[in-house]
Image (tube, rainbow, N blue to C red):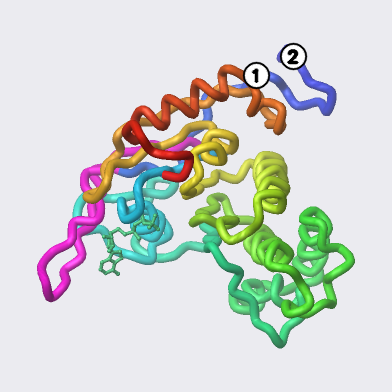
Amino acid sequence: MAARIDNGTPLERAAPAETIIDVKGLGKTFTLDSGPVIALESVDLTIRKGEFISFVGPSGCGKSTLLNMVAGLLPATQGEATLNGRAINEPSRQVGFMFQTAVLLPWRTVEENVLMPAEVFGTKTEATRQKARTVLEAVGLGDFMNAYPRQLSGGMQQRVSLARTLTYEPDVLLMDEPFGALDEFTREAMNLELMRITQAAGITVLFVTHNITEAVFMADRVVVMTPRPGKVSGVIDVELPRPRTIDQMQSQTFTDLIFKVRGILGHGQDSHA
Ligand SMILES: Nc1ncnc2c1ncn2[C@@H]1O[C@H](COP(=O)(O)OP(=O)(O)OP(=O)(O)O)[C@@H](O)[C@H]1O
């Protein structure tokens, strides 16, 4: 029998997790009047169900382009990406996307904003409402369901955005610097919350950040990219135990991992890739 931790979760995985996203030879060239721009070139990546993957790399190396292609928002010009074995050609309800700033409708309450996708997809039921309330409680907004976006801080608005994404239960969550505009303290709290919720729900996360410390702290693997045209220059396994705690950042293992990422990115860079 597998060993168990206090909450009854088996310490060992029963079986190796299966692949959820497979990226093979993926590339994107934009055609501008001034000529072609090769944003991404020959990216290969296999992502397992439930993994948390951070992406770091210099500005303009194609991180957002890669996420947009996995979201089915941009067609590839080379190679392909699959989700559960099927080519990604269009946006899918299994995949949620969260951007740097919360896009909320100012005339709708917090709860109504969270229920927007359900309304659009025609799946709003009492169960969805209940789910929205549970998720809003989980992100600490239980007392703000009837508030309007203008009555919330930036961090709270991002929580609404996170709650909206989580309410429709995506298998994959794509996050493009989701907390980049928040102060350090709020960002740290959001990161811990995000890990707790996605881990409990088994959601696979692709997380783009410019912050190396955050990238390592959050991830099972950190994907380091080269300057444009973006390619994968290294993938680092982060074998720190979960749940992650702030104390782990003081460990030698953590420091070594940061230096490993920096080493691949190139020497002389500060902690913001
Ligand atoms: N729609 C577009 N049309 C033309 N060029 C584009 C388009 N989108 C991105 N690019 C170009 O592709 C390259 C990669 O851009 P992308 O936004 O993916 O980089 P990034 O790594 O996310 O950058 P940052 O870290 O600054 O957000 C850049 O040179 C950018 O100018």
Magenta stretch: helix, strand or loop mostly: strand
Picture disc at residue 37:
none
Q: Quadrant of the N terminus?
A: top right
* Rendering coords of residue 251 (x, y %): 63, 20
- Nearest the viewer among 268 and 230 is 268
Gap in angstroms between the C-alphas marked 2 and 1: 7 Å
Which residue occupies the extreme right position in the image?
143
| Amino acid type, label 1 | Glu
Residue 116 seen by the camera = yes
> Does the residue at mark 2 contact the one at mark 1 (Cβ under 8 Å)?
yes
Residue 94 seen by the camera = no
Which residue occupies 67% across, 26% down?
Answer: 248
Which residue occupies 26% across, 58% down?
Answer: 76
Q: Which residue is mark 2?
A: 3
Lower sequence index among marks 2 and 1: 2
* Rendering coords of residue 197 (x, y %): 71, 46
Q: Quadrant of ligand 1?
A: bottom left
Q: Is mark 1 within 8 Å of ligand 1?
A: no
Which residue occupies 38% across, 66% down?
Answer: 73
* Rendering coords of residue 172 (x, y %): 53, 50
User: Which stretch appears magenta?
Assistant: 24-49
Q: Which residue is mark 1?
A: 12
- Answer with the quarter of the image where residue 69 lies: bottom left
Number of residues whose C-alpha sits closer than 10 Å to that of mark 1, classed few (under 14), some (14–19) or many (20 or more): few
Relative to 170, residue 30 above or below: below
Which residue occupies 24% across, 50% down?
Answer: 228
